[in-house]
Image (cartoon, rainbow, N blue to C red):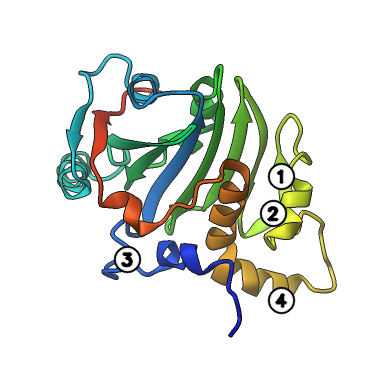
Amino acid sequence: MTNDPLAPYRWLQAADGDPGNPLGDIFCVSFFRGLGPAEVLRRFGPAGPPGREMSFDELDEQVHAFVEETAGGDGGGHIGVVPLGEWCVGIEPSGWTATLPEAIAPLSQGCEVVTVSRHDYAEDDFSYAVDGAVVTTFRPIMPSERHGDDKDRLNELMREVGLAPEEDDDGWEARWEDMSANGLARAFLLAARITGVEFTAGLLSGPLLVGAIGEP
């Protein structure tokens, strides 16, 4: 029996409408080290009301209503946060705020942030930021194209999870096929190697502290 290190994250790549993936084809997951849930919400929506505890289904209903009202151009408008040890996990259904270049640096002030996003109509994204500086960011489908203040810092971990940071002109076709099929799962595995947190579907079954997202 082959041990598949990507197995815990393949549900995140399932097609929109698949009951195994309640997040669908657009979402962002952020991991915050050194912040509590209330502070995470404050950074996403400092002018908004305090967070409210709700289930993922309730969060999804709020997001659906927001998307219908705004025609989807402003993301999901809400984030749900759950604490896990030293980290808090923020979940943005239909959203991408934490991946925005103008957002991730202030979100990471005084803390450590890892974000992974899926967007089937644009691009998936992985970013790592510490204390206001974007260390590295890249598209999982093209991990050799990285940007950031210390873009090579995660190279060893990237190789371990199959996100080779080097270009490979000879094997580009095989790599492209692999990243197309597995890049997002590999990005979540990389996030787990950094944070020690496996983002499993079970995290959506507990209560979330939910707040509105303001201007980045």
At mark 2, the secondary structure is strand
Residue 143, disc: 2
Residue type at mark 1: give it. Arg
Choose between 164 and 53: the one closer to the eye: 53
Q: Which residue is mark 4?
A: 174
Q: CA distance from mark 4 to mark 2?
A: 14 Å
At mark 4, the secondary structure is helix
Say which quarter of the image contains residue 16.
Answer: bottom left
Q: Which residue is depicted at the point 42% across and 45% down?
A: 28
Q: Residues within 10 Å of mark 2 (few under 14, many from 20)?
A: many
Decide which of tag 4 and tag 2 comes sooner along the chain: 2
Residue type at mark 2: give it. Pro
Q: Residues within 10 Å of mark 1 (few under 14, many from 20)?
A: some
At mark 1, the secondary structure is strand
Q: Which residue is mark 3?
A: 16
Q: CA distance from mark 3 to mark 4?
A: 25 Å
Residue 146, disc: 1
Q: CA distance from mark 2 to mark 1?
A: 6 Å
Q: Which residue is depicted at the point 69% across and 54% down?
A: 143
The percent coordinates of residue 32 (x first, y second) are 49, 31
Residue 55 drawn above or below residue 18: above
Q: Residues within 10 Å of mark 4 (few under 14, many from 20)?
A: few
